[in-house]
């Protein structure tokens, strides 16, 4: 997910403290794939709360995004058109009980092969917080409740199971894609917050669940044991200040990650070394999530800290 929205001086203080508490940047690596031809493809409307939080790509070229503060799910066409697919109900208290943040928001999103969208909604209330589903042409419905005192954030789909990170409770949940009760799959200490938000971005790859930890500036790999239980988390990279969501480049376990608070995108090698490949000079406005279609990298920026230009940047992943 992201850093707390800087709506007030208190928010700015919390964010600054969280960023300072994180580890120093990891050493750079010279052997990393660069990004080139970076350009802004879409400008979202900040006045309407269009702060793009997470992204899921469809084969035909559409990108599905969560617009966090607007409580929306939208489709972004290849030509840059933005179409709102759903707006979730506002909680009765306005979302002020949403843990760590104080406002309701849509977060992680994934797309199934049949076009069904699954996404997360955090409100601090028991009636709305959880996993939601939107079938093509249908209406959004909650299919699994998650604890109101948590903050569901990252989302991944593996066959018939959804995995969810909780940034406040430090848990990876498992939820049947058909709906039902959530089960705590991992509560490893590596997922825990250290003052603000812990477990954040989430991916499933090669027999393991991978997650970022924003407070600790780390990437962790949790093996899936033969019986399906979670193994012990292994920290694979450290010193990644403000790390949010990430994606695998398709080149082994090489990762490309959004470093929200420092306004960078970095390529991270399996040995933990990294290279900065995009900065504010490329148009970044607090990057929150990343997805790849072939060698085209999609970077979402929500402008939570800059409050200027939430956008979608496209770039080419070089060799």
Image: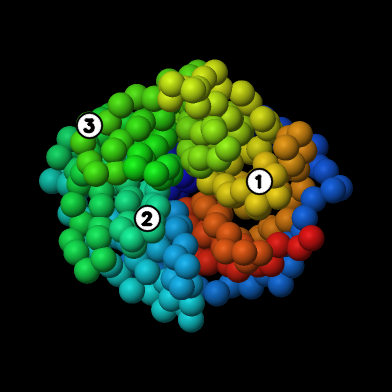
Q: Is residue 33 above or below residue 236?
A: below
The quadrant the C terminus occupies is bottom right
Q: CA distance from mark 2 to mark 1?
A: 22 Å
Pointer 1: what residue? 255
Q: Which mark is residue 59?
A: none
Residue 232 at what x, y percent from top left? 54, 18
Query: Of residues 18 and 182, which is closer to you in this image?
Result: 182
Q: CA distance from mark 1 to mark 3?
A: 32 Å
Q: Are marks 2 and 1 in contact (CB under 8 Å)?
A: no
Local crowd size for mark 3, using a 10 Å CA cut-off: few (<14), some (14–19), many (≥20): few
- Dot 2: what SS? loop
- Quarter-of-image position of residue 37: bottom right
Q: Position of residue 307 (x, y in %)?
A: 48, 59
Q: Which residue is mark 3?
A: 181
Please rate how many residues cluster around mark 2, counting C-alpha atoms within 10 Å: few if below 14, some from 14 to 19, many from 20.
some
Tell me which residue sits at (57%, 47%) in the image: 246
Q: Is residue 257 visible?
A: yes
Earlier-in-chain disc, 1 versus 3: 3
Residue to which mark 2 is pinned: 112
Whether 156 is drawn above or below 227: the answer is below
Q: Residue at x 41, y 30 (%)?
A: 172
């Amino acid at each position: 997910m992201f850093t707390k929205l800087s709506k007030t001086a208190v928010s700015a203080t919390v964010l600054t403290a969280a960023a300072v508490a994180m580890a120093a940047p990891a050493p750079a690596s010279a052997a990393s794939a660069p990004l080139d031809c970076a350009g802004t493809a879409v400008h979202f409307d900040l006045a309407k709360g269009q702060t793009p939080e997470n992204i899921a790509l469809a084969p035909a070229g559409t990108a599905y995004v969560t617009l966090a503060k607007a409580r929306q799910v939208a489709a972004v066409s290849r030509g840059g058109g933005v179409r709102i697919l759903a707006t979730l109900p506002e909680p009765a208290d306005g979302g002020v009980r949403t843990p760590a943040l104080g406002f309701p928001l849509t977060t992680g999103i994934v797309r199934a092969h049949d076009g069904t969208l699954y996404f997360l909604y955090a409100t601090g209330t028991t009636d709305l917080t959880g996993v939601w589903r939107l079938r093509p042409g249908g209406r959004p419905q909650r299919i699994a409740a998650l604890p109101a005192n948590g903050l569901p954030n990252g989302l991944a789909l593996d066959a018939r199971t959804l995995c969810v990170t909780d940034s406040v409770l430090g848990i990876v949940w498992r939820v049947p894609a058909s709906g039902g009760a959530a089960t705590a799959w991992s509560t490893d200490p590596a997922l825990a917050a250290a003052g603000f938000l812990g477990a954040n971005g989430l991916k499933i790859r090669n027999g393991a669940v991978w997650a970022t930890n924003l407070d600790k500036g780390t990437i962790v790999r949790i093996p899936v044991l033969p019986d399906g239980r979670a193994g012990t988390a292994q920290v694979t990279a450290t010193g990644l200040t403000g790390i949010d969501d990430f994606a695998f480049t398709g080149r082994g376990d090489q990762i490309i990650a959004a470093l929200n608070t420092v306004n960078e995108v970095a390529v991270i090698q399996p040995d933990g070394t990294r290279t900065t490949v995009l900065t504010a000079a490329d148009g970044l406005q607090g990057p929150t999530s990343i997805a790849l279609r072939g060698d085209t990298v999609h970077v979402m920026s929500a402008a939570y800290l800059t409050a200027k230009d939430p956008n979608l940047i496209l770039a080419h992943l070089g060799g």
